[in-house]
Image (cartoon, rainbow, N blue to C red):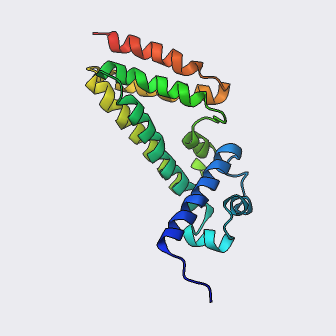
Amino acid sequence: MPAPITEEQNRLDREALLDAAERLFYERGIRAVGMDAVREASGLPLKRIYRFFAAKEDLVVAVLRRRDRRWRGDLAACVERAPDPRERVLAVFDWLAGWFAEPGFRGCAWINAHGELGASSGPVLAEVRSHKKAFHDQLATWVRAAGAPAAVEPVFLLAEGAIVAAGVSGEAAPARHAREAVARLLDKP
């Protein structure tokens, strides 16, 4: 009889599964990736995968949720290093430019998931909306601290527009253009 699987092994296997699924879904698209590809990339048997996540949709939600924590955490770490509130808002766009320039950048994982599954998966749509609201609220905190509460919505739309434009164009320039527009917004009385 095989030894029981420890909690630590469960944690490691779950992380390996999420790593593999996230990489595949982001590189190839969610619908294009079958569970056999996830099995092969993770090194876990399908039976074990389905013990963690009863359906592919559950795996997609878990991937998006984990990516959200990491993505917004990385953004916050960068922004919080800026010396003053105005520079923190502008640092958002500097961080976006760096992300856009990363090898393998394929646009926004949440917009991509929404485009593939948003109309047919309530749980995926809810996760996408949760991420976008959390990002909006994160930006709103920084913009309000910069003394520009009326600029919250335009800054959010400029950030989202830059993300989509960079995903389509494959260039980092949309972050620079959005940063310039935000700087003008923040300078308005």
Query: Which residue in the rendered view is the most extreme toward the bottom?
Result: 1
Question: Which residue is at the front of the view, 155 or 97?
Answer: 97
Residue at point 58% right, 28% down? 100
The percent coordinates of residue 1 (x first, y second) are: 62, 90
Left or right: residue 104 compared with residue 8: right
Left or right: residue 132 compared with residue 120: left
The percent coordinates of residue 68 (x first, y second) are: 47, 45
Q: Is residue 9 above or below residue 26?
A: below
The image quarter containing residue 147 is top left
Q: Which quadrant of the rendered structure holds the C terminus?
A: top left
Residue at point 71% right, 54% down? 33
The percent coordinates of residue 44 (x first, y second) are: 66, 67
Question: Which residue is at the front of the view, 151 or 13?
Answer: 13
The percent coordinates of residue 77 (x first, y second) are: 39, 35
Question: Which residue is at the front of the view, 43 or 168?
Answer: 43
Residue 122 seen in this snapshot: no
Q: Is residue 100 above or below residue 21?
A: above
